[in-house]
Image (cartoon, coloured by chain):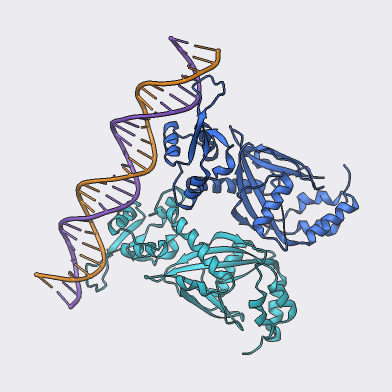
Chain colours: A blue, B cyan, C orange, D purple
DNA sequence: ACAAAAGTGTTTTGATTACACCCATGA
DNA sequence: TCATGGGTGTAATCAAAACACTTTTGT
């Protein structure tokens, strides 16, 4: 394991000095790979713990934009519709123990002290389709990956709780205003969409009823037959009618189950 | 107008030094007086602007408890079920102009600087019944009152927006888990409860249907006839079956309209 | 007796659920 | 032709909405 270079440390120092102290942002990004619900997690240089993406808010930056920036820097994910799911600030919410590893690797005490403070974190969440995630260009993170949402209890600090809260919010939001624009590929089938709903809700829904509801909402446009070599009847391909979809979000149309 | 005394200023200085910087909490407390929806507002000493109750989080204090403490200090309201409705942190969210009045009244530059910073605020809301509010014991506030929710656009800084967001959250929460424990007196009638719902929703609901729904939920216990001298048929008095009510909150019983 | 507000019941409508049946395809 | 999963329709159930009718009180 190498230590941080002097330039890197200076860069980090300037970055932290330009941010609001004791306030952080964390992003829970769900992904649906066709089967299960996953969560984006990152690993910092010189740390062996996995966390959800997170960072700090610059003095001149809106918190919503900070969330977008942080997420992009750490995962290259962009253009997501990020929504708050809560702000967490228990008094004992500081992670000096977890962070203490840094101090043994050339991280100066001043910076260790800064990030070891008690933090209040604002939670944002979103959901994407089959997107890949890439590493940031900066020097601070060494790996990023998707894990199954069921494995999120392995995350460090209180991030398992953040994922769990985000999932609850996602479920209830799914009832009224599903963020489908993000989470499906451009072209998809109704059975695929149903699998996504089932993954989020954690239960199965009736095939026929699901189909009827989705079609009644008029937000899907038929494209044609799937050419995939299935062992059964090929499903019909659809794309999202984005205009009608966005309209339906401003109305209080129920798409829930 | 008198200036702050040296002791008061020292007290304030110590208080602020023990709090997380650039982070505040604001509480939108709704009240239903039988007719209209009202909001609790306070006025600080040496300031002519009205705001919703708010303050800062101590270093050793959970944010939820900070919200309770702040609310109690400024309004004497206690034992409320406070819920977050969002966290607000636009980059330009600082109110040096509004705050500048303090500096002309013996408020030292150091403290003016502290409270003139850009702040991120966590919004909490609740709703109460006919409760009165009283002034805090401390030296910092001079008046507290209820205003009609429709007049909240007169509030200082961005507090009108906070009220508006809180009201939206209250409305949607009303659909699933109404906080009735807080907002009605111990004994009340169904028409009274209906007026409350109408005030929150901003529209009228059918009398017969409202009655049926509420009674079907089984959370009301009949007490007896109202003895009030009404010019019409006296309504039946009810009290809340708190046990069944709390049970219904954990289920996903719909009480919405 | 009448007005006014409370209490009750009924009809209609529409949404949700459960389930049955048919269809297209590859093996 | 059979298994598999996709597509479609329908009857039964349940909740919501609209509305009419009755009851109890003070005047």
Please identify the quadrant where the N terminus of chain B is shown: bottom right
Note whether C26 is above or below A24 in the view shown. above
Please identify the quadrant where the C terminus of chain B is shown: bottom left
Note whether A219 is above or below B40 in the view shown. above
In the current view of this chain or complex, which residue is farthest to the bottom?
Answer: B1
Q: Quadrant of residue A167?
A: top right
In the image, is B136 to the left or to the right of D2?
right
Q: In which quarter of the image is residue A135?
A: top right
Q: Residue B251, percent across and down?
A: 44, 47
In the image, is A221 to the left or to the right of D8?
right
Note whether A177 is above or below B150 in the view shown. above
Q: Residue A3, percent across and down?
A: 88, 47
Q: Residue A229, percent across and down?
A: 56, 20
Can the viewer see residue B100? yes
Q: Which residue is drawn at 53% across and 19% down?
A: A231
Can the viewer see residue A90? no
The number of callouts visible is 0
Q: In which quarter of the image is residue B14?
A: bottom right
Q: Which of B240 and D2 is in front in this view?
A: D2
Q: Which residue is drawn at 40% across and 50% down?
A: B254
Q: Residue A16, percent across and down?
A: 78, 58
Q: Which of D15 and A191 is in front in this view?
A: A191
């Amino acid at each position: 394991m190498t230590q941080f270079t002097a330039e890197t440390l200076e860069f980090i120092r300037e970055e932290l000095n330009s941010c609001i102290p004791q306030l952080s942002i964390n992003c829970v990004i769900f992904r649906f790979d066709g089967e299960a619900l996953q969560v984006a997690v990152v690993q910092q240089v010189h740390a062996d713990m996995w966390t959800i993406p997170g960072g700090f808010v610059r003095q001149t930056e809106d918190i919503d934009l900070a969330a977008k920036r942080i997420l992009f820097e750490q995962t290259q994910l962009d253009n997501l519709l990020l929504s708050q799911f809560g702000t967490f600030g228990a008094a004992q919410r500081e992670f000096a123990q977890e962070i203490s590893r840094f101090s043994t690797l050339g991280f100066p005490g001043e910076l260790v002290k800064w990030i070891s403070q008690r933090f209040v974190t604002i939670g944002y969440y979103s959901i994407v389709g089959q997107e890949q995630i890439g590493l940031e260009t900066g020097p601070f993170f060494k790996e990023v990956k998707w894990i199954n949402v069921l494995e999120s209890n392995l995350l460090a600090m209180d991030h398992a709780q953040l994922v769990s809260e985000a999932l609850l919010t996602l479920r209830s939001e799914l009832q009224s205003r599903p963020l489908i624009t993000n989470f499906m590929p451009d072209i998809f089938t109704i059975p695929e969409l149903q699998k996504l709903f089932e993954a989020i809700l954690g239960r199965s829904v009736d095939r026929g009823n699901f189909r009827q509801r989705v079609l009644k909402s008029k937000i899907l446009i038929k494209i044609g037959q799937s050419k995939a070599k299935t062992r059964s009847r090929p499903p019909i391909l659809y794309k999202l009618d984005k205009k009608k979809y966005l309209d339906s979000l401003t109305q209080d149309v129920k798409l829930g189950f």
